[in-house]
Image: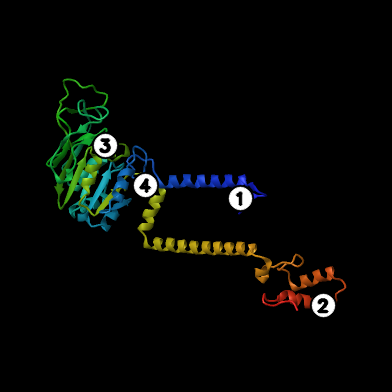
Amino acid sequence: MSWLGDGRIDWPRILLLALTVTVLVTLGTVAATSSTAFGPYNPSWDGSSDFRQDAEDDPTVESHLLSDTAQYDELPANETVAFIIAPDEPYEGEDAERIREFVDEGGTLVVLENFGEPGNELLADVGAEARVDGQLVRDERNHFRGPTMPVATSVENHTLTSGVDQLTLNYGTAVEPGNATVLVATSDFAYLGPEDNELDEQDELQSYPVATVENVSEGKVVVVGDPSITINAMYSEPDNAAFVRGLYADADHVIFDRSHGSGVPPLAAAMLVIRGSPLLQLLVGTIGIGFVAVLSQIRVKSAREALQSRLPARFQPAGNRNDGTIGPGLSDSERAEFLRRQHPDWDEEQIQRMITALNHPRSEDETDE
């Protein structure tokens, strides 16, 4: 393909290429990202792509995006931490049983929920005692950008809170701990209630737990009353990232469980399907190798033909030479007819000798006598 025609830029071709590239980039972005809140592939303020990327960049752990709870069986439970962030749908039947078995076998389950019921239902199914309250927690004195974004400053001395001095919340709720151990709590000036309610003398100001941990069978269950500590807009606020990293610091595997929530883009979903099927992996690998082989042959052939076309005539292969009178692709009968028209005075013997000479060109080493 030439981008110059008679010394001029071929603008239509350039514009077509630019349009094609733009469309491909747009389709690729749509296929590889998500706009769902808390989605691990959502790069916007309400996604958790920073959290996912942080875990993927950690060389000490291997991260896994799960779209089916059956995949829990593929990982060693006692070396794995699973994050379930604000699930859209409840875990029922076999799904809930698989999560319970994961915890029973030594897995660590982290449930981040504020106002949804699926989180509390799952906690009950796995045998945990902690529950999220579901009411908005506010703090008029210790907050980030307003009372609905309280800064939880009461941090207990625990292995899971190493290097953590506070959590910065965003529309979170309190955690009713039961017999669980409180990890982080608000200041003594927090209260619960709807956002449109004004603080009055009837409100009870006190410290509310917002993160707990408890042993369940052979495993652990961590409950956090604000899934927003994982979103991109809040992940870097003090000390949310440090707290989340500490939850999987001693693990070999990290699970992002999206089996009951949206937010998995088509490209990531396709990769999950391929990864779970050896047959599909073989098929995709075979197609890829075949495509590369075909593309390589086409490129090599095109490059060879382009090079040959630029060589002087005496260095080109005999089949590429053309003296301007008889094309190299003509048959003997067509050549004979051409010679009869051009040389009506030639007899058939002369014509046949010429055709034979054209079919058997002299080698480059031969010289004219």
Residue corresponding to mark 1: 3
- For marks 4 and 1, the one nearer the N-term is 1
What is the quadrant of residue 113 in the picture? Answer: top left
Residue corresponding to mark 4: 264
Name the secondary structure under disc 4. loop
Quadrant where the C terminus sits is bottom right
Name the secondary structure under disc 1. loop
- For marks 2 and 4, the one nearer the N-term is 4
Q: Amino acid at mark 4?
A: Val
- Residue drawn at the location 38% of the way across and 54% of the way down: 271
- For marks 2 and 3, the one nearer the N-term is 3
Residue corresponding to mark 3: 237
Q: Are marks 3 and 1 in contact (CB under 8 Å)?
A: no
Residue corresponding to mark 2: 350
Q: Nearer the viewer, mark 4 or mark 1?
A: 1
8 with respect to 286 (left or right): right
Distance Cα–Cα, label 4 vs label 1 = 41 Å
Residue situated furthest right in the rendering:
345
- Residue drawn at the location 27% of the way across and 28% of the way down: 145
Q: Amino acid at mark 3?
A: Glu
Q: Residues within 10 Å of mark 2 (few under 14, many from 20)?
A: few
Distance Cα–Cα, label 2 vs label 4 = 77 Å
